[in-house]
Amino acid sequence: MYLAVPSQPDCASAWLAAVRLVDAQTGHHAHNVIIDVADPTARANLADPMVARVDAFLSEHEKKPVETVSNTIFPAGLYTRYGAPAFFDRFRDNVLPKVRRSEGWSGYYFERMMQLPQVGGEPINQIWDMVERLRNPNVRALNKFELSVFDPARDVNDSPYGGQCLSFASLKLVGKGDARRLAMTAMYRNHFYIEKLLGNIIGLGRLLAFIAKEGGVGVGPLTIVSTHAEIDMSKWDREELKTLLAKCDQASAQSLAA
């Protein structure tokens, strides 16, 4: 049982195609939805009219902006300002104390990726470890670039929602020699497609681009598997969503014509 969204060239197109496909399903939800983005760095900021339109819709409904959702996966501004690996320390020491919700969940997937608890040792920075292995010509295990987010000790409870929704990401080198690119497949246990999906696609694309750049390889495609996806209907009415999608069509046409 799966639902495949036709492969899309960029972030904005992938969001719109996925929303439309899931919205057309009975109950406006689906299982094992597969989204593929050829270039997850394209149409990935507020300069794109469609991204700006979705962001405005979320703001009008007092939901987190697209950039805020994206930053939970990868704090791009912090990286731009401080570089790597220094920005990891800045995030841990300056950002994390301000955003932490509880000991178990700060709301930032980036924290889970850079501070994986380890019994009897310092937390593992899964992201930087991956970069260093990509840089190292002596590393021959090129099929072991994995990012764990779900933690059964912290995340298993009686709430069907809340907490982490991104569970895992697997990265693979594709191609050979100078043409090598890094591809990512990310798995979500539950996914709100209006409120979260666009920011998630953009954030994952930025994380992928960071690892690829620092590791010395090209950026490949992004694939997302939403094991449960829904058009979050309880938060806005049907006419509002129809209007949003119509405006996104107009904004997308504007972007492609530019």
Image (tube, helix red, strand yellow):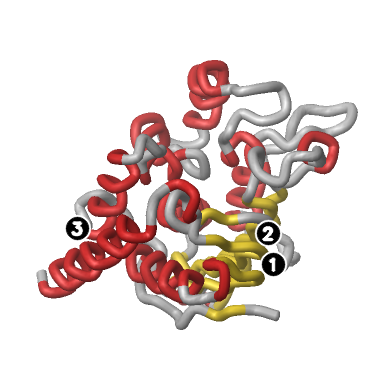
**Can you give x and y, in whole percent of width and height, for residue 47 in the image?**
20, 52
Disc marking residue 214: none
The type of residue carrying mark 1 is Leu
Which element is circle 1 on?
Answer: loop
- Please name the residue shown 81% across and 41% down the image: 156
Disc marking residue 49: 3
Q: Is residue 48 visible?
A: yes
The image quadrant of residue 225 is: bottom right
- Count of all numbered marks drawn on residues in the image: 3
- Please name the residue shown 50% across and 54% down the image: 232
The type of residue carrying mark 3 is Pro
Closest to the observer, 83 or 37: 37
Mark 1 lies on residue: 142
Q: Nearer the viewer, mark 2 or mark 3?
A: 3
**Can you give x and y, in whole percent of width and height, for residue 204 in the image?**
50, 54
Q: Residues within 10 Å of mark 3 (few under 14, many from 20)?
A: many
**Image quadrant containing the N terminus:** bottom right
Which residue is farthest left? 258
Mark 2 lies on residue: 145
- Work out how far the residue at label 1 is from the one at label 3, CA to CA, in angstroms: 38 Å
Identify the mark nearer the N-term, 1 or 3: 3
The image quadrant of residue 133 is: bottom right
The type of residue carrying mark 2 is Phe
Q: Residues within 10 Å of mark 2 (few under 14, many from 20)?
A: many
Identify the mark nearer the N-term, 2 or 3: 3
Cβ–Cβ under 8 Å for marks 1 and 2: yes
Q: Nearer the viewer, mark 1 or mark 2?
A: 2
